[in-house]
Each structure stands twice: as C-alpha cells, then as structure tokens.
Amino acid sequence: MRTMADVKLENLTKVFGKNVVAVDNVNLHIKDKEFLVLLGPSGCGKTTILRCIAGLETPTSGNIYIGDRLVNDVSEKDRDVSMVFQTFALWPHMKARDNIAFPLKMHKVPKAEIKKQVQKTAELLKIPHLLDRVPGQLSGGEAQRVALGRAIIRNPKVFLLDEPLANLDAKLRIHMRVELRKLQEKLGVTTIYVTHDQAEAMTMSDRIAVMHEGKIRQLGTSSELYDHPADLFVAGFIGSPPMNFMDCTFEEEKGSMVSEAFALEIPKQLRNGIKKYATSSELILGVRPEDISIYGKEMPNSIGSEVYVIEPLGHETIVDLELGDKIIKAVTPPTHKVNLGEKVWMKFDMNRIHIIDKKTEKAIV
C-alpha cells in the first residue's frame, strides 16, 4: 500500500553566490496525489524549487517535507522521488529496457523482478515494441516515454517533471499532455510539474503556482487564475492573447474610469470596490481580448478606435485596435468582417473587466 506523500515547503529560500535570490521565502503545500504545476517565465525559480525537492540543490534556508519526513539532510537517492528532465537524460549506449531498468539495478532488485517490472511499465506506456532500441533509434515522443518509464518503475512517492514536453513538436506536445495526465491519475502519484507554457499548466494541473522573481504570486486552479488574477503580473501572464491594460483615473462623482482616449461608466459594485480598496484614484483597467465586442457604429458606453491589424487564425480572428498610443487586441468570430483603417467602436463586458491598483499592482475587483 502506497504511503501518503504530500510535499510541504516552509520558508524555502535559495541564494546563489552572494546575492542572486532564486527562491524567496516560498511556502507551499502540495497535497497527496495532486498534480501541481509551477508556472512562470525563465529565471523565476521554478526549476530551483524542483531541484531542492529532489535533493540536487541544498536550500539556503527553510524546510522541505515529503510526507511527514523532513528531508533537508536526506540524500537524493533516499528521498523516494523520481525526476524527468527536459533532455530526457537517457544513457545513449543502453537499450530502452536497460534505461528503464537502471533505477532497480542500482537498488539491487533481483533480475527476474526487474524483467517483470520493465515489461509491466512498458505495457503501461505502450512501448513494449521499443524495448530493444537504443535512444538514437527513438523519436522524441518515444524517448520521452522511456524516460517516464525509468521514473515510474521505482514506484516513487513523488514525480518531479522539469519541462518534459519542451523538446517535442507542437502536435506531439498536445498529445503527450493528455497521456501524462491520464498516467498520473492512473498511478495516483503526487506530481510537481515545471513549465513556462500556460496551456500545459492550465490543461494538466489540479492547481497552479504562478511564480515571478522567486516568489509565488498566486496559487489556484486554472479558472481561479484566469477569472480572478491576484495582481498585474498574473493578469498579464495568464491568457492568450494576453490581457489588455489601460492606465486610468477613477472619477468618483461621475462613477467613471477616464483616460485621454476614453471615459467609461462602470457598474456600481465596481465603484464600491474601488472606493473600499484602492490606495488612490490612479488605476489600471484590464480587459481580456475575448471580452471585447466590435461594432460599426457608436454604442452606449463604447470607445471609438481604428482597425490597425487583422490576424486571422481560422477558428477566430484577432483584431488589433489603435487607441491613442496603445494597441488593444480583441478576439472576434471569423465571420465578423472588418477592414484595415476602419473606424469602429469597442465595447467591454463590464462584468468581466479587471481593475488593478496602479501603485500596489494588486487586483481590486
């Protein structure tokens, strides 16, 4: 019977050299059997966290628990975790079966048991026909499955996956997202997955920890991050095309958000939120491209603009609209036709806008 394997990070900090703070006082609890994704741009500290959990890096301060066990001073081989790297890191001279079997050989498991476990693992990953090939004879997707096989054959408490799909082509990457998630659910193993790809994070995870500059900026489900971003960074990082941002001033008497390019009346509940939480009248209005409608004539509470660029994508069209010195992106159905240079009016879904305090960069409503 598999033991509980939640992972806890308490005030985890990792400093390289004299002053490069890669991980800055991170607290995080990954639940047993959870699929948690560490998401963020390059250099945000997500891989360093993974390497600290694996025992490949020593924390500068803070604690790491796997289950109820403090593992700060436990060697990498005794932590009962398995890690899959972006490069797969397969032994080039070994056949796939020997690469998969390697962890069991290191633990001196009897040969008959190794053979049985390799076959079982290969069948789970649908690669029995690849067992006698060396890595040079494998495609990217096949090599990735062999690397996964080597990780899961030990039946570890925790999987650590560091951008494992980054080197695959786009079509295979989408296919492997589904396969990896199905595999994790079947095995019921606690999984921590590092990526900079928000589509991967949002489609695969139970929860996502969005990281920036060594800190977790927000922890939540895909829908929580998308619908209720905590701050300016998360709002701009989650979503494709990204959220549009406009600097505004809140005019309380008129109940409006005002800039040089427009004046928008906002709903009463948003006004109340601004009055309650904003540190000043200087705000940032955020609106997702899919929450903008385009009209050929002026509508109530709409903003006049000009079509700057049209980006047809087949299933949808992205229309870039010129608004003062800003370009605002709107997503429209492919049947909605506009022309370059055309005067149009955009209307925001006022139930879906985001208002951010310019000084603190925290979301207000």
Image: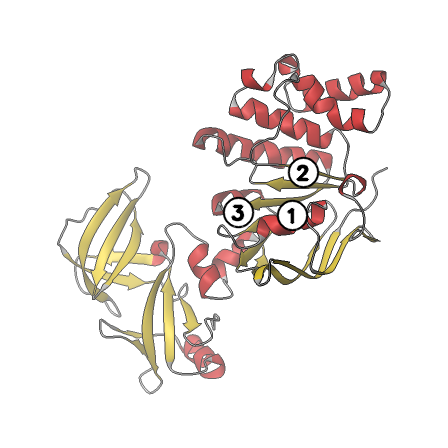
- Look at the image and name its color scheme: secondary structure
Residue at image position (47%, 75%) is: 360
For label 1, count other residues whose C-alpha is less than 10 Å away and answer few (under 14), some (14-19) or many (20+): many
Mark earlier in primary sequence (2, 1) = 1
Q: Which mark is residue 50?
A: 1
- The local secondary structure at tag 2 comes to strand
- The one nearer the camera, 335 or 170, is 170
Residue at image position (52%, 57%) is: 225
Residue at image position (62%, 40%) is: 161
How far is the residue under mark 2 from the one under mark 1?
9 Å
How far is the residue under mark 2 from the one under mark 3?
21 Å
Q: Which mark is residue 310?
A: none
How far is the residue under mark 3 from the one under mark 1?
19 Å
Q: Is residue 280 above or below residue 109?
A: below
Mark earlier in primary sequence (3, 1) = 1
| Disc 2 + disc 1, Cβ < 8 Å | yes
Residue to which mark 2 is pinned = 83
Residue to which mark 3 is pinned = 202
